[in-house]
Image (cartoon, rainbow, N blue to C red):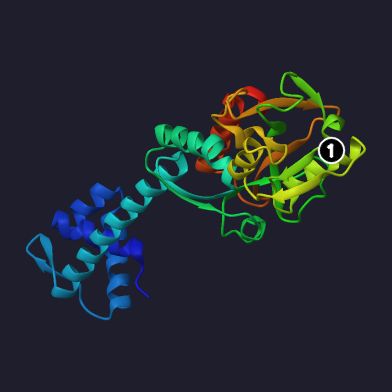
Amino acid sequence: MLDMRRMQILRSVVSSGSVTAAARNLGYTPSAVSQQMAALEKEAGVALLERTGRGVRPTDAGRLLADCAAAVGRHVAEAETALADLRSGRTGRISVRYFATAGARLVAPALALLRQEHPGVHTELRLDEDPLPDVKAGRVDLALVVRRHDAPPVDGVRFVHLLDDRYRAVLPAGHRLADRVVLDLAELAGEPWVGSELPGPCLDAVLDACAAAGFTPDSVVDSGDYATARGFAAAGVGVALVPGLGLAGVPDDAGDVVVRDVTRPRPTRSIWAAVRATAPEGPVLRAFLMALRTAATDTTGPTA
């Protein structure tokens, strides 16, 4: 196998035209350079240099190896530059998974901040309701999930809390409680309910709060999404609980519905960023986590 250090010395000999000049440029003795050239010729099994008066010139084999050494040198320099860009966060990639209502209020502004500070970073975003297996396996760098504060740990996954997103009551505009500013959750016990959540941690947060208030909601329809739930409420079908992120852009008095705070207890879902426990927190991942925290802090109104 050819020694790369010796090939670089050959490159210097060829470019300078003599062993003596190469030794001076490299800070070696001429004897040391000659020894290295002899060793490289032995490795190559062919003559690499021939004498021309006081200097040397490369054979075809010597020119070939000198050109290869120059190419390797360029590739190493390019690799060092690329590595420096990666270490600094000027380049890189991050794959992110998120659930629907976190997209507009958290992921979009976080992505905008990331692009301002790290414009060379490539981001891969995808909607995913069950991303933890991919996070754990290292196929995804970061995922937004809903989980309880007292949820058991997940092996191989680290969770970073972003915000607590509290649910609010969505009532038909003419509802008997529409003139109230804040409602006790128990006041909705006898109402027909419009379910807004699919089975999972978000629905669990609603059902746990209702159980703490002493009742189980009587769902007359399960909408499965927040916009549809609001439409059913506006039509007078029933009342709904919708998290603040799901009410983005909906005023408290929207004409067809009213939105009111709920207390005693206050139904809340907790939103976390999930990353692989053993993943190094490089500049891109660190920057995106900071951007998500900023987006969560900037989230206004009842979701703050």
* Residue at the outermost left position: 53
Where is residue 208 shown, x and y percent of the image?
A: 85, 42
Residue in the foreground of this view, choosing between 247 and 281: 247
Residue in the foreground of this view, choosing between 277 and 150: 150
Quarter of the image containing the N terminus? bottom left
* Residue at the outermost bottom position: 45
Residue in the foreground of this view, choosing between 210 and 205: 210
Q: Quadrant of residue 40?
A: bottom left
Identity, as a three-letter code, of the amino acid under mark 1: Ala
Residue in the foreground of this view, choosing between 91 and 130: 130
Quarter of the image containing the C terminus? top right
Tell me if I can see residue 75 in this picture: yes
Number of numbered discs visible in the structure rendering: 1
Q: Taking 288 as reference, is 35 above or below it?
A: below
Q: Dot 1: what SS?
A: helix
* Disc 1 crowd, CA 10 A, few/some/many (<14, 14-19, 20+): many
* Residue at the outermost right position: 214
- Could you tell whether 176 is left or right of 291 in the image? right
Q: Taking 208 as reference, is 176 above or below it?
A: above
Residue indicated by mark 1: 209
- Could you tell whether 130 is left or right of 31 in the image? right
Where is residue 224 shown, x and y percent of the image?
A: 65, 50
The residue under the point 90% across, 37% down is: 212
Q: Quadrant of residue 186?
A: top right
Where is residue 190 shown, x and y percent of the image?
A: 85, 37
Tell me if I can see residue 287 in this picture: no
Where is residue 108 shown, x and y percent of the image?
A: 49, 38
Q: Taking 45 as reference, is 54 above or below it?
A: above
The residue under the point 45% across, 39% down is: 88
